[in-house]
Image: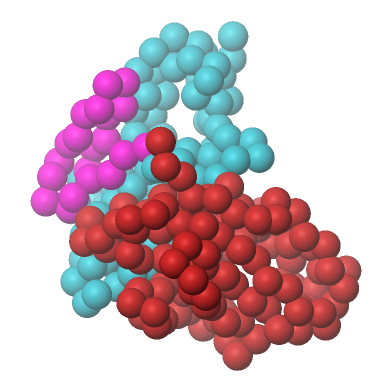
Amino acid sequence: GEDVEQSLFLSVREGDSSVINCTYTDSSSTYLYWYKQEPGAGLQLLTYIFSNMDMKQDQRLTVLLNKKDKHLSLRIADTQTGDSAIYFCAEINKNFGNEKLTFGTGTRLTIIP
Amino acid sequence: EPEVTQTPSHQVTQMGQEVILRCVPISNHLYFYWYRQILGQKVEFLVSFYNNEISEKSEIFDDQFSVERPDGSNFTLKIRSTKLEDSAMYFCASSPTGTSGEQFFGPGTRLTVL
């Protein structure tokens, strides 16, 4: 079945860029997503990318997709303390009317002052 | 900004009891979902619901589970006879069209089965 993998932890100095990586196995993934989870809160949709795109930029967030290597990354520019959270990569395959998101384990981003 | 809400935030129950977790999806959304996250594990899909019926379910969603949209606003998940391994955070999500797959999540209900 589909699988999505992420490293568990990332520490970054305030003001630096954070790069969170994700790999997935389903070559037919249609959309790939990044969700943010702050302590005690739900999953906040940050951004998503369609599988025929290589890059998407939204303010401080840049998503890069390497479809050949099945690798997705999220770059957060000028990382702030408010960016501390768990970041989940997820994918969906809409080709067969599939409705389910498959999530990675989440990467806990810690900001060092 | 409209958001998905869930009640209660924390539910404690005894093994074998029935629980109902409640969700109010975003009002103009048409697709509804339940996911769960056991502590330390991945977020897992349980079920999707569209046009008043289940459109997809995972192998986790066995006969102990059921979903219902009893009125125009609520979406519920019922677990008939809870087991210890049902302890998890349960997330409800909704989507406007299902086309781009954008799913908006609620804050979750933490279910503890004793």
Q: Residue at x 49, y 50 (%)?
A: B4
Q: Residue at x 41, y 24 (%)?
A: A18
Q: Main secondary structure of the magenta part?
A: strand
| Chain A as rendered: colour | cyan
Image position of B28 with respect to A37: above or below: below
Image position of B112 with respect to B17: above or below: above
In the image, residue A84 lies at what x, y percent? 55, 26
Q: Is residue A76 left or right of residue A64?
A: right
Q: Give the residues drawn in magenta, as a range.
A: A46-65
Which of the image's four quarters has the N terminus of chain A?
A: bottom left
Q: Is any part of residue B67 visible from this angle?
A: yes
In the image, residue B44 lies at what x, y percent? 52, 65
Of all residues, the one furthest to the bottom in this rendering is: B63
Residue A46 found in image quarter = top left
| Chain B as rendered: colour | red
Which sits in the foreground, B19 or B57? Answer: B19
Which of the image's four quarters has the C terminus of chain A?
A: top right
